[in-house]
Image (cartoon, rainbow, N blue to C red):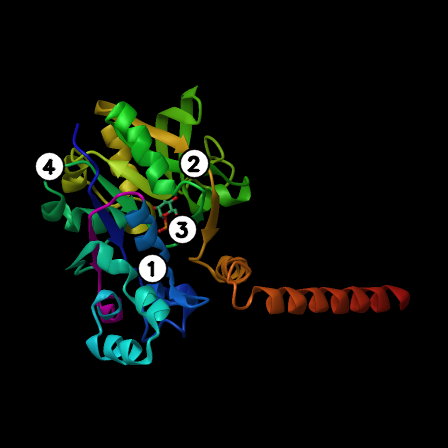
Amino acid sequence: MKKIKKAIIPAAGLGTRFLPATKAMPKEMLPIVDRPTIEYIVEEAIESGIEEIIIVTGKGKRAIEDHFDRNFELEDNLMKKGNFELLDKINQSSKVEIHYIRQKEPKGLGHAIWCARKFIGDEPFAVLLGDDIVQAEKPCLKQLIEQYEETELSIVGVQKVSDEETQRYGIIAPSVMKGRRYQVDTFVEKPALGTAPSNLAIMGRYILTPEIFDFLDKLETGTGNEIQLTDAIQKLNEVQVVFAYDFEGKRYDVGEKLGFVKTTIDMALKDEEIKDELMRYLIQKLEKNKLEIANFKSLY
Ligand code: G1P
C-alpha cells in the first residue's frame, strides 16, 4: 500500500469576505490569537504524518512563503534573549517540507488541485482547505488516513449542517453506511436551497487517489463558473469508489466573519496566558447584556 505522504493546501483565493483586511495581506495570514490560520492547517498535516506539503498560491501571497521560511535575524534575537519558547513556536513548521506553486488564473478549487499534479505524481494524497479548522482529539486528517489504510480508496471528510447551510457546501447523497463511513451515490457542489440530497457536507479534508487528475484534466466549469473538485470526485466515484467519513471533532469556519470571531474566542479561551482574563471579560459582558435586556423589557 502507498502511504499518504503528500498534501496540497490551496491558498489562492482572494479573501473578499475579509476586505479591507485582505487588500494587502493573504487571508491565510489573518491571525487567530497569535498564529496565522494556515499554521493550524499545516500543524494538522504534520500531526497526521504528512511529510511534504505543496501550497497553491496566487498573486499577493508572498507573506505565506515568508512566514514558513526561516528568519535568521529574528531567531538570533530570540536566542540572545534566551526566549526558547518563542523560538520553538516560530519554527514549528520546519518539521515538514513546504513547496509552492502558483495558480495563474482563479479558475476554482479543482483547477488549484490540478496545478499541483506534477508534485503529486502517481501517489494517493491529501487535500486540506484553509477555511476549515478542525479541533479534534485525533487530527481530522489522521482519521481519514486511517480509513484510507483500510480501503485504499479516496475518502472525503463530512459533517452534518443545517438545511439552510447545504447550499454553501459540496453535499453527498449517502448510500450504505459502515460505522462513520458512507458509500456515496452522488456528490453535488452547492445544491440550490431545498434540493440537497442530504445534510452531509464536505468539510475541506480529502484523501484522493491520483486517478482524480484524469478527471480534473478534462473537466468543464461547473457551479460559479469554476472548475469544481466536487465534480471531479463525482466522476471518479463512477469508476472507482469514493467514500465519505463523518469525522469526529469540532469544525470551525474561518472563511467568514462570524465563524472567524467564534474561532478566535474559542482558541483564546484555550490560551493559558489570556484565558482567565478573557473569561472574566466575557462574563462581565454577558451580565451587562442581561441588565440591558431587563431594562428594555421593563419599558414595555
Ligand atoms: C469548497 C468546496 C466545497 C466544500 C467547502 C468546504 O467550497 O468546493 O465542496 O464543501 O469548500 O469548506 P468553498 O468554500 O471554497 O466555496
**Horizontal and vertical percent position of residue 289:** 75, 67
Question: SS of the residue at dot 1?
Answer: helix
Q: Is residue 194 left or right of residue 143?
A: right
Span shown in magenta: 48-65
Q: Amino acid at mark 2?
A: Phe
The mark nearer the N terminus, 1 or 4, is: 1
**Foreground pick, 113 / 285:** 285
Q: Depth-wise, is mark 1 or mark 4 nearer the camera?
A: 1
Comes first in the chain, label 3 or label 4: 4
The N terminus - image quarter: top left
Q: Indicate whether residue 59 is drawn in magenta.
A: yes
Q: Are marks 1 and 2 in contact (CB under 8 Å)?
A: no
Give the class, few, some or many, for how many residues have Cα within 10 Å of label 1's Cα (few <14, many ≥20): many
Q: CA distance from mark 1 to mark 4?
A: 27 Å
* Observer able to see residue 239: yes
The residue that disc 2 covers is 247
What is the distance, in whole Å, between disc 4 and disc 2 at their CAs?
A: 26 Å
Q: CA distance from mark 3 to mark 2?
A: 13 Å
Q: Residue placed at 35% from the left, 28% from the top? A: 186
Who's the residue at 19% across and 36% down the image? Answer: 124
Residue 138 lies in the magenta-colored region: no
Q: Amino acid at mark 1?
A: Glu
Q: Type of residue at label 4?
A: Asp
Q: Position of residue 233 (x, y in %)?
A: 27, 35
Marks 1/3: CA distance?
A: 12 Å
Residue under circle 4?
122
Ligand 1 closer than 8 Å to label 3 CB: yes
Q: Which residue is mark 3?
A: 132
| 37 over 194 or under it: above or below | below
